[in-house]
Image (cartoon, rainbow, N blue to C red):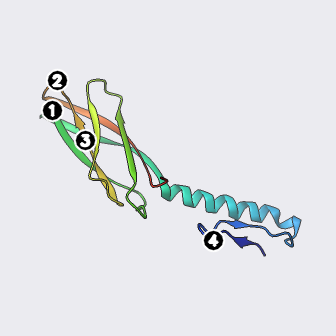
Amino acid sequence: MGSTTPKYGIPYPLGTDRVMDGDNAMQSLAQKVEDLLSKRFQAGVITVNLNNQNYNFATVIFPFAFTKVPRVTVGSSAGDFVASALNPQTTGFDAGAFRPAGPITYTVNVQWIATDLY
C-alpha cells in the first residue's frame, strides 16, 4: 500500500508491497517530485521597454504562487544594461533594466530564476 514522507508527502513503497507494483510506485514518486519542484523553482524571461529612458521595469507574475517569498536572481545578455529584481513577493516581482550610459529607446530581455529552496 505504501506510505508518504511527513514533510512533503512524497510516496514510497513498503517492504510488504508487491514487486510487480513497483512501476506504479515509481510513477507516483516521480510525479510528486515534479509537482513539488515546479512550485518551488520557476524561471522565465520578461521584456522591459526603455522609451528614451535609462531605467524602467516590468512586473513578473509567477505561474504558481510560492509559499514564502522566493529569492530571485536576474540577468540580461545585453552588455550595457544592469538587471534588477525589486519588491519580491510570493506572487511575483518587478524586473528592472538600467542603462548607466543614459537614456535610450531599446527593448531589454531580462532572464529570471526564483526559488524558495533556501
> Which residue position holds label 2?
101
Marks 2 and 1 in Cβ contact (< 8 Å): yes
Residue 32 point in image, percent of width and height: 62, 63
Question: Which is closer to the viewer, label 4 or label 1?
Answer: 4
Q: Are marks 2 and 3 in contact (CB under 8 Å)?
A: no
Q: Earlier in the sequence, mark 2 or mark 3?
A: 3
- Label 4: how many residues lie within 10 Å, few (<14), some (14-19) or many (20+)? few
Res. 96 mark: 3
Determine the secondary structure under disc 2: loop
Image quarter for residue 96?
top left
Is residue 115 depicted above or below 17 in this figure? above
Give the crowd class for mark 3: few <14, some 14-19, many >=20 residues within 10 Å: many
Question: In the rendered view, would you say 79 is above or below 50?
Answer: above
Q: Earlier in the sequence, mark 4 or mark 1?
A: 4
Distance (Cα) linking label 4 and label 1: 50 Å
Under mark 4, the amino acid is Pro
